[in-house]
Each structure stands twice: as C-alpha cells, then as structure tokens.
Amino acid sequence: MNEIELAESFFAALQDRPIIHNTIGAVLKDTALKRGRSEALVEVKQDGNLGRRWNYETLYKDSLQLAFALSSRFKKGEHIVIWSPNSPEWVLIEYAAALSGIVLVTANPSLQEKELRYILENSNAVALFLVPEFRGNPMAAIAKRAVVGNIAVRETINISDHEALFNNSCGNTTLPTVNPEDPAQIQYTSGTSGLPKGAILDNRYWLTFSRNGAAQFLDQLKRILVAQPFYYVDAQWLMLMGCWTG
C-alpha cells in the first residue's frame, strides 16, 4: 500500500504506475501463453462444493470459443446484459465479450421487473444473459415480462444452456479489432440521487485499474476467494482481472 501523509487538502495523482494501453483480450491471451498450465479458475457451487476447474490455457480457449459464437450473433460495440449470480459462465462471458469488442452490462440478480426493464432500455441492450432462478427470485419469468415491447433485445439466453450460449451456427472464426479505448463494460450506480446511471469503462481503464490496484494486495497471495458479486466493481478489478493482469 502507498503510505501518504497529507499536508494540504489537494493531493496530486500518483505517477508511479503507468497507464496500460492494451486490451483485456490481448492481455488474457498473453497470460495464457505465459502461465498456460497454472490453475486459473475453480468453481465453488452454490452448495459450497467445488466444481469445475480451468487453467489459463483452457480458460482462454473456452473464452475464445465463446467469443467466436458471440461475434457471430452480435456486432462490435453492441451491449449485452448479464443478469446472474457468480458462476464460471459469468467469467467466460466477460472475457468473450472483451475479445469480441462487445460491451458487457452488469446487473444485480436480485433486480425486479421495473429495475431490469430500466437497465435493458437505458443501456440499449440487444441481449439478456441470465439464469432461470436465484434464491427465490424467478428471473426467467421476470425477464419475460421485462422485455415485452423492447424490440432492441434480440436474444434472451439461459447461460446454463451451453448449446444456446455457445451457438455459432455459421462457424464464425474471426473477431473484430478491439482497441484500448473501446468500451468494455457499463456498470450502473446505486442511484442514490435518482435513477441508476451507467458508467462506461474502457479496456485501458480496466487493465490499469486492475493491475495497479491488485499489485498492492495480491503480491503474496497464491489464491483468492471471490465472495463479492461479479456485477460489483470491486470483484471485477481486484479478483476477476487483478489476479492475471499483474
């Protein structure tokens, strides 16, 4: 951690760590080449038992396969909402969207119809990725009502259905060029002063924020348990990206 003693109210920005002019997909690929067989992701199921595992090589491979599928159905720059609790599929969708230049919009799985409808419409989303139910919240039923009249939403995908999630019927194997300044995510504020507002976060921001922030916490750690929800910014920069961007 940086040790700072303030002598005045103004505090200049730290200059000791550079801005990373790269993309999430490029850094993920580079990490897979460097750490290929090292364990990258371990699933902890909702009942607390351990499930599937990925090393960096297989994590990148599966993310790339999903990226080809997403790029066959969505254009670079289009917005897709992920409305789900933590899962490996959440991680794969995030990385695949980054590889595809598709903007991921994160949503709290406890949202109700009015709240979900607002995010879908406000973000100009073209697809909704979800699970059917979580902790008694009937998400599939809510989603069905929330998209009524929204002609922009072309797909509603159950992320547990891998055939639907990885659908690439045209056999696409190409991806668009993604730039550091291209948007990667839209995260919504709590809306304490009104309706939630979408904050647009680009590739350069995520990589710089993740690497610089995680360097202060993760240097001595071999593993980290992600207890925070993935839709929340802290889980993103410190855990989902900070672990492999350093």
Image: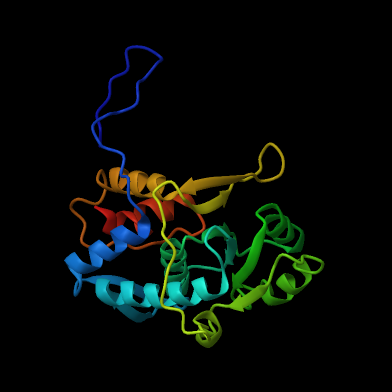
Along the line of sight, the residue nearer the viewer: 240 or 157: 157
Along the line of sight, the residue nearer the viewer: 113 or 30: 30
Residue 125 at x, y = what percent? 65, 61
In this view, 229 is above or below 164:
above
Residue 188 at x, y = what percent? 59, 49
Left of 80 or right of it: where is 228?
A: left
Q: Residue at x 39, y 51 (%)?
A: 237
Seen from this angle, which residue lies furthest right?
149
Q: Residue at x 31, y 39 (%)?
A: 19
Left of 229 or right of it: where is 241?
A: left
Residue 181 at x, y = what percent? 43, 46
The answer to which quarter of the image holds residue 155 is bottom right
Residue 219 at x, y = what percent? 19, 50
Q: Which residue is drawn at 26% across and 71% down?
A: 56
Number of marks in the image? 0
Left of 90 or right of it: where is 134?
A: right
Q: In which quarter of the image is the N terminus?
A: top left
Colour scheme employed for the rendering of this structure: rainbow
